[in-house]
Image (cartoon, rainbow, N blue to C red):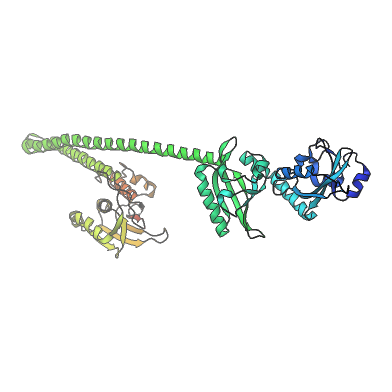
Amino acid sequence: MSATVPPDLLAALVPDAAVLVDDGTGQVRGFNAAAARLFGPGLQPGRAMCTLIGAEHQKALQALLAEPSADPQTETTVAQRLPLRLETGAPAGLSPRAMLRVGLRHAGLRLWQFEGLGRPERQQADWLLARFMQLSPGAPFALELDGAPARLRFTIISPGLCRAFGLDERVLAAPDFRVLPHVHAQDRDALAQAMREAARHLTDFHHEFRLLHSLRGPVWHEARATIEIDATGRPGAYGYLLDISARKRAEQQLEAMHAGLEQRVRERTAELEDKHREMERFTYSVSHHLKAPLRGLDGYSRLLLAEKRDQLDDEGRLFVDNIRQAARQMSQLIEDLLAYSRVERLRPTLVALPLRGLIDEALAELDESLRSQAAEIRIDTSTLSVCGERRGLLLVLRNLLDNAIKFRRPDRPCQITITARPLESSGGGTELTIADNGIGFDMRYHDRIFEIFQRLHRVEDYPGTGIGLAIVRKAMERMNGRIHARAEPGRGATFVLEFPPAAGSIGGQDP
């Protein structure tokens, strides 16, 4: 017993819960053990009893208390009964319910007797669920879906739900409370439509929207719920709200970072393109200005030999020949650098190209050199095609065939074997190999031969600028392909070209 109560007054009320209330102040003066179990720790002497009754029952309670407790004609006790919800700290919708009987007065006190509604095991389950909802970091809820979305209201209200709205539980539980007016105007229609679809098809509900908090303003929430049909056939939503404002801020910051990064990339790209065009103009200007004096050197040295040959001794004629040879070498170097620059700028549209036709065209351009060396050519490409760009592929073929002729062994006829086969292991594509029986090279220098200006032999022995294979590698890269080589000194070299499996446009050649 939590307070001194006349034993004869409460003895007849056991096992129902009984509370003595001051009829003037409405404060609790005493209660029995059954009432303590029903109300929990909130029931204390001196507390206003009306605060332990659901707000929706206050008017009916006042009317009940205003009625006389005894029949004035017979002076017998009148049984006054009222079903109501008790405020015990449990979420709305899970609060215990009881039948109230009031009437008997004694020394300014009125006896309130409560008969619990529902089985004890149900009350225990509700208590456990209420405890879970109190401790949940989210905002569990139950929502009526029977009717238009504009009339949506909660049937179970958790402490987290009150925090999400920034409203008192009494406000959320009020009969005239509606959900959608507390949703951001830009999100209401989408939320209502999503809930209509979930109720119609009885599917799980998942939606993100902004909830209008009473103090914080719009706050992003994620709602997840399961749609179920109750015993009366009406649909309801049972789920939770989760504050995702921190995640949304992170997403917005990430989007802003991406936007800023994309803008910087565009600016950087434009800057690089400007510098690229400036470099092209510089390259062509330099090549033009370099070729002019080279042509002068070659022309005047040729005139010198033609008109003053008799006045020059053997050493003088050798010097003039060396001047002409250096001018021709310089001119070829300029041409190769321009070719490398054009390949560097190549942005080809890749298409299927028949191999045999391109190989025949490249061989025709080198016909004179091939005939002079009595070269033997073997071709086995069947009807295969490669994915590439015509000009780039012709450039590759000409350079590799020219190398096979240039780096031949002097003690045997030049032999070149060209084969092709489909690539299965790498997901498709075509492999083209060009093999020769020339001088080969040491595989230690494999990567070096594809670098610009890198040579393995003296220019006096094998003329060239050291740019040809660099051009080949660059052209293959522009066609999304690869090149590598196998070789052994004195036993020839095999260059392997791998082409992609399908054509895909990656732009066009710069002007």
Note whether 142 is above or below 286 in the view shown.
Answer: below
Pick whichever, 23 or 234, lies toward us: 23
**Residue drawn 51% across the image and 42% down it:** 185
**Residue drawn 59% across the image and 45% down it:** 179
Relative horizontal placement of residue 180, taking residue 131 as reference (left or right) = left
Quarter residue 181 falls in? top right
Query: In the rendered image, which quarter contains the C terminus?
Result: top left
Pick whichever, 53 or 460, lies toward us: 53
- Furthest residue to the right? 8
Relative horizontal placement of residue 218, taking residue 131 as reference (left or right) = left
Residue 436 showing in the rendered view: no
- Furthest residue to the front? 73
Report x, y in % for residue 452. 31, 42
Report x, y in % for residue 40. 80, 44
Note whether 377 is above or below 158 in the view shown.
Answer: below
Residue 378 showing in the rendered view: yes
**Residue drawn 71% across the image and 42% down it:** 55
Report x, y in % for residue 103. 84, 45
Note whether 415 is above or below 132 in the view shown.
Answer: below
**Residue drawn 31% across the image and 58% down it:** 386
Q: How many marks?
A: 0
Report x, y in % for residue 228. 63, 57
